[in-house]
Image (tube, coloured by chain):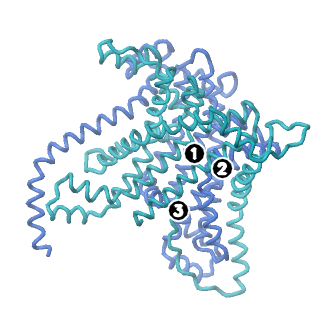
Chain colours: A blue, B cyan
Amino acid sequence: MSELAIPTLEAQVKSERSAIGSLRMVQTASILVIALVIVSPLFMLLIASLKDDRFQILADMGSFRAFWVSNPTLSNFAEIGNLSGELAFGRYLVNSLIILASTVGAGLIVNSMAGFVLAWGSLRGRALILSLVIALYVIPQESIIMPLVIMVSRAGMTDTFAVQIVPWIASPLYIFLFYQFFAQLPKELFEAAQIDGASVFRIYRSIFLPLSLPALATVSILMGIESWNQYLWPILVTQTDYARPIAVAIATFFGQDSIYWDRAMAASVLMMIPILALYLAFQRWFVSSFVGSAVKG
Amino acid sequence: MTLQQTVRPAVIARSASRRDNGRLIQEIGMLAPAVILLTIFLAVPFLLSFWTAMTNQPLVPRPTPIRFVGFNNFLRIFRDELFWTSLWNVSRFTFWILPVQCGLAFATALLLHQKLPFRNLFRGLFFLPAITSMVVVCVIWGTLFQYPSGPFNQIIGFLSGGRIQPIDWLGDPNWAMFSIVLLSAWQAYGFQMIVYLAGLQGIPDELYDAARIDGANAFQRFWHVTMPGLRPTHVFVLVITTIQAFKLYTQVAILTQGGPKSSTETVVHYMVRSGFEEQKLGYASAVSVILFLIVLVIALLQRQLLRRFDV
């Protein structure tokens, strides 16, 4: 069959080859146009954050000068980078980092343990728990936020770090991602360790977890983005600077009569750096595995 | 969203019975943190919201006891014109965001699926807005939208030779929601792009080869191989985008506060306002129950669609 097929295929590929050349050009041009649309606002942000004069920033925006800074200065960053005072963006950044690290750290442990037991445990009612977890996935954060605010304020948890961390550690989506990942590993792994006398926790800790780098990376990135970008929840549960995250602090720029764009831009760049670092660190595993779970999930 | 259950690994041979108890305790211990947290912070508030929705609970506790008011909150919501405006607004938003965001994501994924130079670099670049916080996106687009001499208006003025008057992107009721659509699509399309890329990778090369042998040209291959292969992906992307659209909040709260003239009022913004500015928590909970029901209906619709496509 293939002896017949190959010549026909090759002939057609050859005839298409000339068309492909011009198609390539169109494709490359399109990619570059999209890249321009996507990246230029971010590039503009970076450039503007290095400019000193907030009126000049707006004046430059409409021309190519938006992409060029003749005498870059870090004065905006110096102005907002302090840890106390009126524009204590350094402090808000640290707050956000504390919340991010705690949420993701605890989330990786809690969700992966649950996913592991649901995939490999011998517990009765495991299937029921799994379907309950999946059912909970449909509930959007926005629709539980009202009663949750009452609950945490009754518990005296407002204006703390804990209130921004603890409620978002366990998540149906991430439990399911871990479950799915663990369940597709070969059962010989589990059985061999069991015969050697390893306990369930030991098998999870020493064998399955080290193999789950793609799942850990994916959940870290997704949870990190989610935690870093929380906005509605922190404005409801923080009243003072003590635990206020940087997203809320940046948003306060918009309440003012004339916006200090120079500082807002610098604060925005500051806010992008940690999550960008997280993304770059884990990106290699992220793309390939987010993938499989997404469409089914 | 339907979460399809992956086939569970075969049942493991039971170990010696004296070890069973210890194993069970360990398993319960490993499962407990997640179950307890999900119960306290998801299941309980979810069930509570149905109860709160039927009371006159205020935000700040009052000496007067909380009264059960039945479906009164819901009736008042349905009689409030602003609620219907907010529902209409998120519908308009959905109508615009679906083609703009999903179209951009699909087109980009198709391009990146080709063997173009530097395509990994482009893939990384195109995902950057998706990791950018909505607050930062608002700072960027807030400058782009400046009236009358922001970048967009200057570009339009330059291209039209000054014939087109500057547009008050965020201040004109006719434009405000569309401006929100533009920045939202820019921010969120990266996720959809990755989902589409995964869908494209999932179509076996053999299908394309077979189509070539049958003499199908590039367009025919796209229409008869790529599109059918992407059906579940399309359903997933459209549903996720629709659900996100109905939860629209942050960009509106920061840039327009629902204005001008309520043209960007959304369901979640309406909910937060009635709960925290007007302090009517019972009323706001009723809105949140309605929001949940909307999301549930969309999710069930996805299930039905996927089942019809036999995936």
Q: Is residue A281 left or right of residue A12?
A: right
Query: Gap in Å between the C-alphas at discs 3 and 1?
Result: 20 Å
Tell which subunit mark 1 falls on: A
Q: Residue at x 34, y 48 (%)?
A: B109
- Crowding at label 3, few (<14), some or many (≥20) Cα neighbours within 10 Å? some
Assess whether mark 2 and mark 1 are in contact (beta carbons under 8 angstroms).
yes
Q: Position of residue B3 (x, y in %)?
A: 53, 62
Q: Is residue B231 left or right of residue A129?
A: left
Q: Is residue A26 left or right of residue A265?
A: left
Q: Residue at x 56, y 46 (%)?
A: A224
* Mark 2 and mark 3 on one chain: no
Identify residue for label 3.
B3
Nearest to viewer (mark 3 / mark 1):
3
Q: Residue at x 53, y 34 (%)?
A: B89
- Crowding at label 1, few (<14), some or many (≥20) Cα neighbours within 10 Å? some
User: Helix or strand or loop: what does disc 2 sit on?
Assistant: helix
Residue B101 vs A65, above or below: the answer is below
- Crowding at label 2, few (<14), some or many (≥20) Cα neighbours within 10 Å? many
Q: Position of residue A205 (x, y in %)?
A: 60, 67
Mark 3: amino acid = Leu
Q: Position of residue B157 (x, y in %)?
A: 34, 15
Q: Check residue A168 in the rendering and tell me which mark sits there, or answer none.
A: 2
**Quarter of the C terminus of chain B within the rendering:** bottom left
For the image shown, how many numbered marks are present on the structure? Answer: 3
Query: Gap in Å between the C-alphas at discs 2 and 3?
Result: 20 Å
Query: Gap in Å between the C-alphas at discs 1 and 2?
Result: 9 Å
Q: A103 or B106, which lies in front?
A: B106
Mark 2: amino acid = Trp
Identify residue for label 1.
A226
Q: Position of residue A273 (x, y in %)?
A: 52, 36
User: Helix or strand or loop: what does disc 3 sit on?
Assistant: loop
